[in-house]
Image (tube, helix red, strand yellow):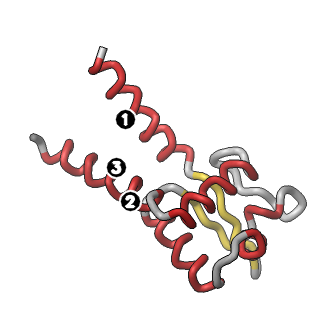
Amino acid sequence: MSNYRTISLDHYATIFKALSNPHRLQIFNILTGCCEPGTLCSTDEMMSCCVGDLDSQLNIASSTLSHHLKELHHAGLIEMQRNGKQVLCSINPATLAEVAALFSSARTTQN
């Protein structure tokens, strides 16, 4: 197995590990419903992309939310941008495309 393939598999493992936590999966699901992938919602749009508003939608401590967002960001699943005192989050479309390609290639090799 080449190094490139090993690195890719490690990358996918990081993604799936991040999504294996129910809170992180819930956060990811909220973010997929609030913003168009790859766009950061402005404060005039859906406020659920703001970290402070995510906090109000989940029944977890702010420090726990921060940890889960860090893990999702580390896995490349979300992008974060500071806007003054607010931190806005969005889904990373490149990572979604990578995961879709993984499943697409798995499906074509089985046929």
Q: Residue at x 51, y 72 (%)?
A: 70
Are discs 2 and 3 less than 8 Å apart at CB?
A: no
- Residue 43 image point, x, y percent: 85, 64
Task: Give the amino acid type for the residue marked by disc 1 in the picture.
Answer: Leu
Q: Which residue is mark 3?
A: 12
Q: Which residue is mark 1?
A: 102
**Nearer mark to the viewer, of 2 and 1:** 2
- Residue 106 image point, x, y percent: 32, 28
Of residues 60 and 67, the one nearer the viewer is 60
- Callout 1 crowding tier (Cα within 10 Å): few <14, some 14–19, many ≥20: some
- Marker disc for residue 17: 2
- Label whose residue precedes the other's in the sequence (2 or 3): 3
Disc 2 to disc 3, C-alpha distance? 8 Å
The correct choice, above or below, for 83 with respect to 95 in the image is: below
- Callout 2 crowding tier (Cα within 10 Å): few <14, some 14–19, many ≥20: some
Task: Give the amino acid type for the residue marked by disc 2 in the picture.
Answer: Lys
Q: Is residue 25 left or right of residue 49?
A: left
- Label whose residue precedes the other's in the sequence (2 or 1): 2
Q: Is residue 73 left or right of residue 45?
A: left
Are discs 3 and 1 less than 8 Å apart at CB?
A: yes
- Secondary structure state at the residue bearing disc 1: helix
- Label whose residue precedes the other's in the sequence (3 or 1): 3
Instruction: Find the residue positioned furthest to the left.
Output: 1
- Secondary structure state at the residue bearing disc 3: helix
Of residues 37 and 84, the one nearer the viewer is 37
Q: Is residue 51 left or right of residue 108?
A: right
Disc 2 to disc 1, C-alpha distance? 16 Å
